Image (cartoon, rainbow, N blue to C red):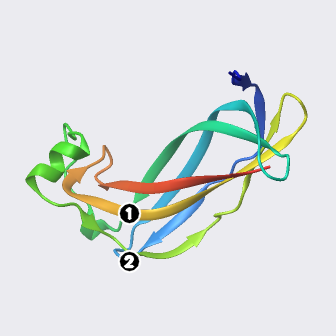
Amino acid sequence: MQRIKELDFKARKEDWMNVFLEDGTVIRFKSILTRVFDTGQRDVLSEPIYRIDSQNVVVARAPDELKGQPSEFVPPIQEIVKKRRPTIVRIKALVGDDWNEYELEDGSIIKTRTVITKVLRLDGYFDSYGNPVYVVQSQMIVAT
């Protein structure tokens, strides 16, 4: 049985993406790599296969007409969905959806890119600045 090895890394390029929504909101989105593991496996081209962990940072800037009183508590989305369906908000444009680059401890480079698959607005819930709360569904792609 092969063991996976956690690798140290440093960010070479890790920029914000701006997601322009049809409701007038701009979401600043960043997917941050938090851990990288060498699985000890290779793909068909003999490239290493890595397992990664990441976290997303989502910051909304909504137009005034969508803002409301900041919510004291925002329940988990699973509880919100039981009461009412989130609003799917269409994406008008993406700016800055380039590849992020990371240098691993062994000198090799991996690239990640986040693909936004859906944006949901949790109507009736607002962040501490009065912006609606959004959930951004995404998938991260890794390339060596």
Residue under label 2, please give it. Answer: 22
Q: What kind of residue is marked 2?
A: Glu
Residue lying at 56% horizontally and 71% vertically, measured from the top left = 94
SS type, badge 2: loop
Q: How crowded is mark 1: few (under 14 residues within 10 Å), some or many (20 or more)?
A: many
Residue ID at (84%, 53%): 45
Q: In this view, does 99 lie above or below 31?
A: below
Question: Which residue matches tag 1?
Answer: 119
In the picture, the quarter occupied by the N terminus is top right
**Residue sitting at x 22%, y 41%:** 74
Q: Where is residue 102 in the image (x, y as percent from the top left)?
A: 78, 42
Name the residue nearer the viewer: 34 or 26.
34
Q: In this view, does 134 lie to the left or right of 141?
A: left
Q: Residue farthest to the front? A: 1
Q: Residue 100 carries which label?
A: none
Vertically, is 58 above or below 97?
above
Up-down: is 33 above or below 8? below
In the rendered image, residue 29, in percent from the top left (x then y), is placed at 53, 54
Residue 36 at what x, y percent from top left?
A: 68, 32
User: Which residue is at a point 78% across and 45% down the rendered structure image?
Assistant: 110
